[in-house]
Image: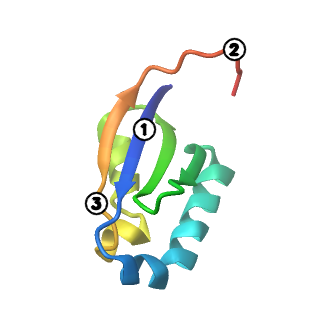
Amino acid sequence: MKYFAVFLPMKDEQKSRDFRPQHLEFLKEGRDEGSILMNGRFVDGAGGLVIYQGESLDAVESKVRADPYIVNGARYYELHEWEMESNFDF
C-alpha cells in the first residue's frame, strides 16, 4: 500500500462553507473504509491536508476528484506520493 498527501488549498471560501458538511461526510466515509488515514484543516484558513492510502496515484486521484470540495469548485488539490517514516503502525 502506498501513501499520498493531498493539499486542498482554498479556492472559494463561500463554497467551502456551503459544501463543508458533504466534505466532512466524504472524509468520514474514507476513514471508515480505510482509504483515508487522517485529515485536518490549516488553522490559518488556507485549506487542509488529507493523507490517503491506496494502490496507485491514479486510484487515489479518482477518489480525490470525488470530494465534494473538488466537484463543486470550493478547493484546488495538489497530490503527492508520500513516503511515510514513523514508528506508528496503521
Q: Position of residue 87 (x, y in %)?
A: 69, 14
Q: Quadrant of the C terminus?
A: top right
Label 3: how many residues lie within 10 Å, few (<14), some (14-19) or many (20+)? Answer: some
Amino acid at dot 2? Asn
Residue 88 left/right relative to 68: right
Q: Earlier in the sequence, mark 3 or mark 1?
A: 1
Mark drawn on residue 87: 2
Label 1: how many residues lie within 10 Å, few (<14), some (14-19) or many (20+)? Answer: many
Label 2: how many residues lie within 10 Å, few (<14), some (14-19) or many (20+)? Answer: few
Q: Earlier in the sequence, mark 3 or mark 2?
A: 3
Q: Position of residue 2 (x, y in %)?
A: 46, 26
Q: Position of residue 5 (x, y in %)?
A: 42, 38
Q: Is residue 55 above or below residue 48?
A: above
Q: CA distance from mark 3 to mark 1?
A: 14 Å
Residue appearing at x 43%, y 31% in the figure: 55
Q: Is residue 34 above or below residue 14?
A: above
Q: Earlier in the sequence, mark 1 or mark 2?
A: 1
Mark drawn on residue 76: 3
Mark drawn on residue 5: 1
Residue 41 left/right relative to 83: right
